[in-house]
Image: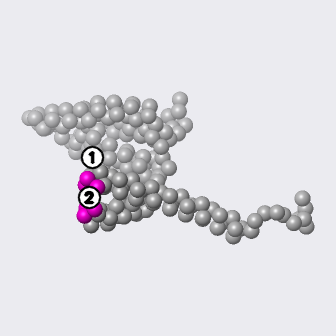
Amino acid sequence: MTLAEPQNLPPASAQTVSATGHAAGQVLRHCVLSILVLAVLWGALTGWRADALIFGLPAILLGAMVPFLLPPASGFRLSLRGAIRFALWFAVQSVRGAVDVALRAFSPDMRLRPCFRTYPLNLPLGAPRITFINIITLLPGTLSAEINDDMVTVHMLDAHIELEPELAELETRIRALFALPQPPEHSS
């Protein structure tokens, strides 16, 4: 085909209308399905009483609107294998953290040498990064204190603890949990 030959393609505006119409249809189906599910749930909970619709109808409509008020999905997916491994590791770390703090609290000298350290955030924004920052607090003697751009400041109870290896391991486990690729240095 040359530039002079006519092309049998719909105009760009028609393609946009078609895509918009498809998306609008999906939204409408989702909304109707939500209303139906919530109405059946409300009816079952209230014994199908008509007078319960005084409160039920607004609740059903508000409930159907909630997904439209939330931010769009992150696009991250969880790995079942990563989740199981993470849960086991998390349980061990939680116990380690609790025992460490308890031993320090009951020790006569408390072995406290508090300090702050920074660590670069290498995980993508959203659920992986939020999970990482929140889990830091459950590691023995640590607390996520501040986030600036792509750095997290961690408060530590003991300046002699090697923080970087523990955070690198946590980052690797978060990547496995969210099925994210490991950076080249962790791939081997």
Q: Which residues are magenta?
A: 46-52
Q: Is residue 101 left or right of residue 24?
A: left
Numbered label attached to residue 49? 2
Kind of residue sitting beneath label 1: Leu
What element does badge 2 sit on?
loop
Residue at the extreme left:
108
Q: Is residue 48 left or right of residue 37?
A: left
Determine if the magenta segment contains residue 47.
yes
Q: Earlier in the sequence, mark 1 or mark 2?
A: 2
Q: Position of residue 163 (x, y in %)?
A: 33, 39
Q: Position of residue 65 (x, y in %)?
A: 39, 63
Kind of residue sitting beneath label 2: Arg
Q: Say which residue appears at 12% left-offset and 38% top-offset.
A: 105
Numbered label attached to residue 143? 1
Determine if the magenta segment contains residue 82.
no
Residue 99: which quarter of the image?
top left
**Residue 105 versus residue 14 in the image, above or below:** above
Residue 5: which quarter of the image?
bottom right
Q: Say which residue appears at 55% left-offset and 37% top-offset.
A: 184
What element does badge 1 sit on?
strand
Q: Say which residue appears at 43% left-offset and 38% top-offset.
A: 177
Residue 33: which quarter of the image?
bottom left
